[in-house]
Image (cartoon, rainbow, N blue to C red):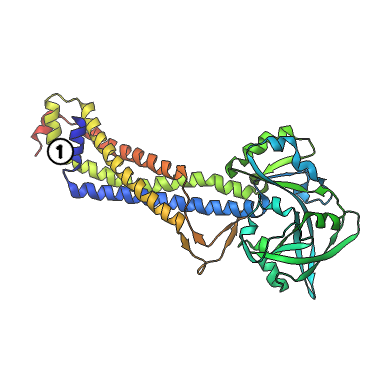
């Protein structure tokens, strides 16, 4: 009976109910869309830092990432540690050797960072092969081929096939120098990589640095980047003391703080928006209770208990919240799907922005995340019940005699 009464009472004043319902639906749908876009932005930032350069996990000497010490190197077969082979979470590994020096062509020289990699393994860890603007990704037969950033290519005025000279300090104290041939050019939108990074074959760089069979790190990827820290904590106790595994949060502490703050920011945004929605719900049900004072008095005079009256009004708010939730989630999912598939390209208006170690791309797109639906849904129902409690409590405290006499 209460369910029938509650549903009937919702539509006593259709215009007021529809206005409140519209506000709830719009707030829920737009909030879901906004959270989906924010999640897409943070995912782009994390991808730009991990899938274009660092990887999700990095195995190296404990001192290497503090000072980039040329001599903090490891044997290349360290990548085949049994503990790494047993870790099902790891989906790709790439041994790397790193060097810093000058890249020259004619009268032009630029400081660069060279990553010596095995091309087929590096493509399992980073995604530069999908961001080529010219040429091709270095292959195994390219003995001295180099994949360089677009900004670096522009500064040195080179294109695929051109020769470059790299000069650096070798491990034996000599000056290492050799020719490189540009095999391809990439563009990530991150000026640090586009202007200063070059990928070269690992054997070529090992020979140049006089470090045969040695590497500085092993970059790895896992299925879910958000579990990288947990995977690192599981691996480190099983590894020798002279090596350690760092997750992307250790390498990019600012990025970790930004993503950790997202959950707090999400709750703040949801609370502020739904507080305004809650005021509308509160107004609707206060007006409804005042209009039905005589009805409540008659029901109480016939024996209906105050807690039943309170439950009736709360049931009405719950039903309204459920209707708004179903429509709002559906609209939010449709808009999120559109932004995921199509998105909005802002490249003509803004440029990529580097922040917290990642890059915010000039595009708006959304991603589906369970939390972006559950948090708005849960908060909408909670706010609905909280907003309905005051009118419900007022109805339950009515004096039956005075209420029956109410005009």
Q: Position of residue 81 (x, y in %)?
A: 75, 38
Instruction: Using the image as rendered, state which of residue 94 and residue 229 is in the foreground.
Output: 94
Q: Please, is residue 148 above or below residue 366 in the view?
A: below
Residue of label 1:
292
Q: Residue at x 47, y 45 (%)?
A: 369
Quadrant of the rendering where the C terminus is positioned: top left
Percent across and percent down for residue 304 are 16, 25
| Relative side of 201 to 279, left or right | right
Residues 113 and 266: in front is: 113
Circle 1 sits in a helix, a strand or a loop, which is it?
loop
On the image, the x and y values in percent for residue 264 come to 49, 44
252 or 145, nearer to the observer? 145
Q: Is residue 181 visible?
A: yes
Q: Position of residue 59 (x, y in %)?
A: 73, 43
Image quarter of the N terminus? top left
**Looking at this rendering, what residue extends furthest in the front direction?**
141
Q: In which quadrant of the rendered view does residue 225 lie? A: top right
Image quadrant of residue 158?
Answer: bottom right
Does residue 396 appear in this view? Answer: no
């Amino acid at each position: 009976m209460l369910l029938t009464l509650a549903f009937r009472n919702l539509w006593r004043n259709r215009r007021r109910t529809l206005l409140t319902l519209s506000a709830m639906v719009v707030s829920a749908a737009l909030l879901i869309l906004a959270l989906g876009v924010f999640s897409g932005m943070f995912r782009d930032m994390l991808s730009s830092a991990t899938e274009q350069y660092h990887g999700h996990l990095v195995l190296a000497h404990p001192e290497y990432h503090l000072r980039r010490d040329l001599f903090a190197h490891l044997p290349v077969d360290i990548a085949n540690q049994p503990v790494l082979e047993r870790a099902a979470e790891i989906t790709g590994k790439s041994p790397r050797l790193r060097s810093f020096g000058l890249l020259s062509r004619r009268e032009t020289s630029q400081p660069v960072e060279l990553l010596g990699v095995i091309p087929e393994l590096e493509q399992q860890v980073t995604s530069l092969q999908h961001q080529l603007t010219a040429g091709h990704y270095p292959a195994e037969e390219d003995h001295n081929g180099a994949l360089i950033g677009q900004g670096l290519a522009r500064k040195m005025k080179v294109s695929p096939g051109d020769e470059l000279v790299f000069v650096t300090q070798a491990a034996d104290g000599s000056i290492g120098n050799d020719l490189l041939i540009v095999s391809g050019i990439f563009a990530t939108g991150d000026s640090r990589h586009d202007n200063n990074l070059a990928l070269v074959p690992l054997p070529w760089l090992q020979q140049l640095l006089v470090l045969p069979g040695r590497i500085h790190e092993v970059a790895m990827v896992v299925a879910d980047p958000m579990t990288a820290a947990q995977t690192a904590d599981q691996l480190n106790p099983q590894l020798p003391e002279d090596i350690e595994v760092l997750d992307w949060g250790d390498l990019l502490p600012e990025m970790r703080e930004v993503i950790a703050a997202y959950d707090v920011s999400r709750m703040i945004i949801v609370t502020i928006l739904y507080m305004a929605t809650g005021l509308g719900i509160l107004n609707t049900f206060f007006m409804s209770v005042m209009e039905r004072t005589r009805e409540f008095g008659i029901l109480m005079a016939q024996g209906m208990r105050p807690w039943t009256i309170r439950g009736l009004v709360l049931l009405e708010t719950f039903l309204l919240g459920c209707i708004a939730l179903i429509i709002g989630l559906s609209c939010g999912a449709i808009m999120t799907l559109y932004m995921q598939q199509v998105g909005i390209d802002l490249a003509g208006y803004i440029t990529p922005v580097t922040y917290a170690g990642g890059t915010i791309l000039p595009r708006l797109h959304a991603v589906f995340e369970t939390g972006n639906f559950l948090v708005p849904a849960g908060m909408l129902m909670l706010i609905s019940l909280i907003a309905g409690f005051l009118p419900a409590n007022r109805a339950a405290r009515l004096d039956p005699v005075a209420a029956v006499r109410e005009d």
